[in-house]
Image (spheres, coloured by chain):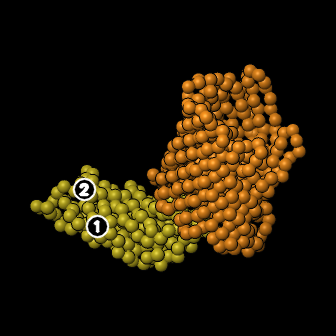
Chain colours: A yellow, B orange
Amino acid sequence: MTIAIVIGLFFAPTAVAKTLSSDPTKGSVVFNATAIGLKFQGKGEGPAGNVQVDSTVVGTFKFKMDTLDTGIGLRNQHMKEKYLETAKHPYGELKVEDVTGFKQASPDGSYPFKGTLTIHSVAKPVSGTVQVKKSGEGLQIKAEFDTKVSYFSIPMPAYAGVALKDDVKVVVESQLN
Amino acid sequence: MRGFLFLLIISFSTKLWAFPEMIRHGYINCTTCHVSPSGGGLLTAYGRSLSKEILSRWSTEGEENLLHGAIKNEAVINWLNGSQEVGFNVGGDIRYLQQYTNNDLRESGRFFPMQRDLELGFKWNQLQVVSTFGYKYLPNDDDKFETRRYYLMYQATEYVSLRAGRFLPIYGLMIADHYTDIKKGLMFDQGQERDNVELNFIKDNWSATATYSQTPQSALRPLDKAVSLQVNYALTDTHRVGVNYWNSESDLKKRNIMGLSGLFGFTHELYALSEVDLQTTQAAGAQTETQGIYYFQKLGYEFTRGAHAILQVNGSQSNLDVSNTKSVGYGLGMNFYPRPHFELQALWTRFDANLDQDMAFLILHYYF
């Protein structure tokens, strides 16, 4: 499923555009799914991408869909082969288009953000919140947003009478340097 | 040395027991894997699949199905595993127990069948009827044919179901360990199934069960009527806590139980089950009440797939004013699920306090 995120800004008074990059090995992408009587996570490596920070925040992150792991082999197989079709759609993408109220001078805080999520080669707008914490010269981010399986032309996952609910929560953590 | 032991429980069963330990994989309610909202017994098709995918050490393709995959026709499999809107569900359990006891009065052991049940279900859209057919072991008599559990269940909505029939009412942890004080001590033991009408609600992080139940008509037992309630809340994907309430009355006594229970999956390997109950009883005509406490704590670790080490504490004090009613057992054991359909459980328990005793058992369980 997913991807994402977001950003950093620095100084207001003397805002200087700055490009930050994320390292996939120092983050994670997690989706939380539910069915009746069942809650589980799929977790994959972090996103890769760059974010440009000045008076606004813009950037694009990509994520390898095949790294998602739900903890059960058969469930992984069904997820990747029948639903996400990771061989045909190997990457998810999150384009960050706006982080509202971000303060470059004092970045620590929680901000609303808007963007576009592309999964299964279908793009849909998303919005959520991102927690930002200054970390050295970079930023630690944790972005959360809700979306739906049905937005992305993916058949509703079901197996042996247990059907996933449409709503999925996505959490993306990354270290931007 | 006093107290050595072995316990064996072997059982074969079709879909028998619930495994609340599966909370560590996000299974916060029984109904994903079992037809019964209280767990145990008939498996759903999904539950069968899980017995292969994450419960058992080894498996081959289709082994989780009825007759270990000998039936190859998918339509027939689906017709018999409850996955059709209209169809059957066939299962059963066979459990054998080797028990060993050593105390000041005796050293004894016995091997006997705990359960030999065929369980059949028929599903017609939102309606399901389920019944067991088996033999009850009687130590000094001929075994007796019985249907220990049967019910009619109606799935009214995605979240609400209604069930009526004979089964153990939902209270506390729905674990297979019926010898524990939270089961046997509180009269939720096997053989104490009641006639129930039960309303179940499961949605998102919440689940609740309200039950009216009474003891079956019998010349041997007084009619006992009860209302009970269980409410559970999933704190996270792998942590669930619950509150439990029981109120019953017969010609002989009134009984009130309040308890807390919890399922905690710390990792995919490490988990804990916990329950503590306070029981208040009042004999008919008596002015005073008796209070007792019952508890069960289990810590498990799956050190390799299908093999679990277990530490547990099982205790009670049936009368808080009388110290010699206290009993505490400290258990060490293991569970092993070698292949789908098979479970092996061994537990040694050292009892302290007023009962200087060692007890052990081995259970072999076959579920089909």
| Residue identified by numbered label 1 | A113
State the image quarter where residue A121 is shown.
bottom left
Residue A109 badge: 2
Q: Residue at x 81, y 35 (%)?
A: B110
| Camera-side residue of B25 and A8 | B25
Residue B80 falls left or right of residue B276: right
Q: CA distance from mark 1 to mark 2?
A: 13 Å
Kind of residue at badge 1: Phe
* Mark 1 element type: strand
| Camera-side residue of B309 and B33 | B33
- Label 1 crowd (10 A; few <14 / some 14-19 / many >=20): many
The chain under label 1 reads A
Q: Residue at x 76, y 47 (%)?
A: B218
Residue B164 badge: none
The residue furthest left is: A13
Q: Quadrant of the C terminus of chain B?
A: bottom right
Q: Residue at x 55, y 55 (%)?
A: B209
State the image quarter where residue B199 is shown.
bottom right
Q: Position of residue B31 (x, y in %)?
A: 60, 59
Q: Residue at x 68, y 58 (%)?
A: B165
Kind of residue at badge 2: Gly
Q: Quadrant of the N terminus of chain B?
A: top right
The chain under label 2 reads A
| Camera-side residue of B18 and B281 | B281
